Image (cartoon, rainbow, N blue to C red):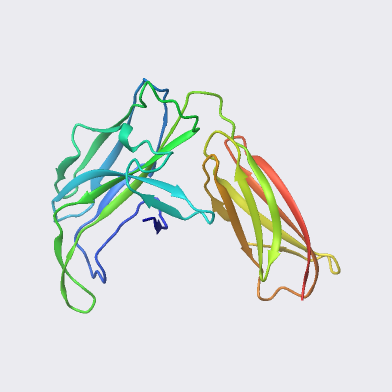
Amino acid sequence: MKKIFCFMPLLMLMLSNVGHAQTGLSVTPPRVYFTVAPGESQRQKITVSNVSKTSTLDLSISLNDWSYDEKGNNLIHNAGSTPTSCAKWVAILPSSFFSLAPGEHRDIEIQLAPPANLKDSIAVHTAMLYVSQLNPVDDVSQKGTNIKVAVRTGIKLYQRLPISRNANLDIENFAKVKEELVLKFANIGNVWADGTASCELLNRQTGKKTTLKDIIFYSLPGDKRDIYFTLPQTLEKGEYVASAVLNYGDDATVKLAELEFKHE
C-alpha cells in the first residue's frame, strides 16, 4: 500500500502530543547524489548527530523506496518494490546499528553499487534512507500524560549514470480550474530537475500586474507534475493574461506558458 508523506529536509516523527521531549536527531545532508555506472561503486558520507543534552540514542538505518505523485507529494514504498529503486544496491558502513552519546555525532558511509548486469534504461534510481531511534525516552504530553518518544529522520538517495546531464521539462498544459491556475509539465530529461514555478497576472483593462506566490518543485525523469497557483480573493474582475515560468537546472533554464482568462 502506498503512503503519502510531505517531507521537510529533516523529517522528525514523534509519538502524538509530545510536550518537551529531551531527544533529538539530525542527519545531514538531506539529499545524497551518486554518479556511478553498473559494476562500479561509489561512497558518500552523511553525518548523524544526537542533539539531545541528556539522552543517549540507540539508532538503526533502514531503506525504503519513494517516488513523487503528480502534486509533488512523497510516496513511500517497500524497499526494492519500484522499478526505480536502488535500495538493494546500498550498503551502510561500518554498521547499520550504532549509539550516540548526548551531543555526539558520527560520520556514516553509504556505498552504492549498481549490479554489473543491470539492463534497465531508467535514467535515475532512488531510495529513502531512514535513521531511527530504537530506545524511546520518557516524556510528558501537553495533557500531562506519561508517554514514550522516539525520533526518525529520512534522507533521499539519488543515482544516475556518468553521462551528460540533460535537465529538460516540457509544459503540457496551462488552464484555469475554478479559482486556480493549473500548470502541467513533464520531466523529459535524464536527470532530476528542481526549481521554482512563478506566475504573474496582467489585467488587460487596467494594466495592473499581480504576482502570485512562487512554488518550489522537485521532479525526476518520467514524472508528470501539476502546479497549482491560487488566485487571490481580492483579484479584480476582468480579462487577464497569466504568464507562468519554470526556472530550473544548474544553468537556470526557463520555460514559459501564457494563458488568457476571464475572472468574474
**In this view, which residue lies farthest toward the bottom?**
143
Q: Seen in the image, is 189 located left or right of residue 15?
A: right
* Residue 158 visible: yes
Image quarter for residue 5?
bottom left
> Relative to 220, does residue 164 appear above or below in the rendering?
above
Q: Give the residue at x 26% y 47%.
A: 131
Q: Give the residue at x 24% y 46%.
A: 49
**In this view, which residue lies farthest toward the right?**
205
Number of residue marks: 0
Q: Give the residue at x 68% y 57%.
A: 199
Q: Seen in the image, is 146 located left or right of residue 155?
A: left
The N terminus is located in which quarter? Answer: bottom left
Q: Seen in the image, is 142 located left or right of residue 154?
A: left
> Relative to 159, does residue 196 appear above or below in the rendering?
below
Residue 110 rendering spot, x and y as whole percentages: 29, 33
* Residue 214 visible: no
Q: Which residue occupies the foreground of this view, 171 or 236?
A: 171
> Relative to 245, does residue 113 appear above or below in the rendering?
above
> Relative to 146, does residue 196 appear above or below in the rendering?
above
Residue 173 rendering spot, x and y as whole percentages: 69, 53
Image quarter for residue 91?
top left
Residue 186 rendering spot, x and y as whole percentages: 61, 45
Q: Which residue occupies the foreground of this view, 262 or 8?
A: 262
Residue 37 rendering spot, x and y as whole percentages: 42, 23
The C terminus is located in which quarter? Answer: bottom right
Image quarter for residue 43?
top left
Q: Give the residue at x 22% y 79%.
A: 143
